[in-house]
Image: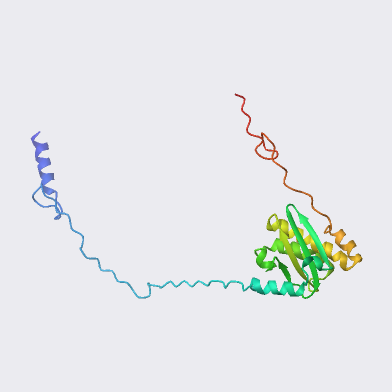
């Protein structure tokens, strides 16, 4: 037993502790981090971000007063006194169309067609199809009075009105216009709501109890 205790004491005395632990066992010294950290920023790392935005200029449209004077000068006596005139209808929209020899202007309710139809390419295509079919896109000026419905219905009503007015230019225009379906009045309208239903056909959800 004495031999084992002496061997333990010799092994403990041979152990060496690091200098970071103090002799006082109750206090432990912890190295403090440096208060200031040297940071070097090179001028190349900083970059300036520049953003440039361009605002599109609004489309210059002719004043309504000038267009009214133009229409009155071109159509003496009003729409009813003209010879090349056609009436088109679609849904609740009605359009009276007058054709005159010109350069291809479209004036709807004393406003330019692109402005009136809000630049919608589909609606603008509707009103140009009859003239494009016959190759008259730059041969006639179109003057329109439209009311009722929305812009989509009015655009399709104008298309029918132009096609009917072109028949008064020449009876030979009937065949190509009819072949493209431009002389057919689209009779589809919104179906009325029914009593007890939410819409024309839609019924409320069924409840057994």
- Say which residue appears at 68% left-offset and 56% top-offset: 150
Q: Of all residues shown, which one is farthest toward the front? A: 77
User: In terms of depth relative to the viewer, which is nearer, 86 or 57?
Assistant: 86
Q: Position of residue 122 (x, y in %)?
A: 71, 61
Q: Quadrant of residue 204?
A: top right
Front position in the image: 30 or 134: 134
Count of numbered badges drawn on the protein: 0
- Across and down, in percent, residue 157 comes to 76, 58
The quadrant of the picture occupied by the N terminus is: top left
Who is closer to the viewer here, 45 or 171? 171
Residue 123, quarter of picture: bottom right
Identity of the residue drawn at 79% across and 52% down: 186
Left or right: 25 with respect to 62? left
Residue 88 lies, in percent from the top left, at 79, 58
Q: Is residue 169 above or below residue 8?
A: below
| Residue that extends furthest to the right in the rendered view of this protein | 172
Q: Residue sitting at 76 percent across and 54 percent down?
A: 90
Residue 140: x %, y % from top left: 80, 72
């Amino acid at each position: 037993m004495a031999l084992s205790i002496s061997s333990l004491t010799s092994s403990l005395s041979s152990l060496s502790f690091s200098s970071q632990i103090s002799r006082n066992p109750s206090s432990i010294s912890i190295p403090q981090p440096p208060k200031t950290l040297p940071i070097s920023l090179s001028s190349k790392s900083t970059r300036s971000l520049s953003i440039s935005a361009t605002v599109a200029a609004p489309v210059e449209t002719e004043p309504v007063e000038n267009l009214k004077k133009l229409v009155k000068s071109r159509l003496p006596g009003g729409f009813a006194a003209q010879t090349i005139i056609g009436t088109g209808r679609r849904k609740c929209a009605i359009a009276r169309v007058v054709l005159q020899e010109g350069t291809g202007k479209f004036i709807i309710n004393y406003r330019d067609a692109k402005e009136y139809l809000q630049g919608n390419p589909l609606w603008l295509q509707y009103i140009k199809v009859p003239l494009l079919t016959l190759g008259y896109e730059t041969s006639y000026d179109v003057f329109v009075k439209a009311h009722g419905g929305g812009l989509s219905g009015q655009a399709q009503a104008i298309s029918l009105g132009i096609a009917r007015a072109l028949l008064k230019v020449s009876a030979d225009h009937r065949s190509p216009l009819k072949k493209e379906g431009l002389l057919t009045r689209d009779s589809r309208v919104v179906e009325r709501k029914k009593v007890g239903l939410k819409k024309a056909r839609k019924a409320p959800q069924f409840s057994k109890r």
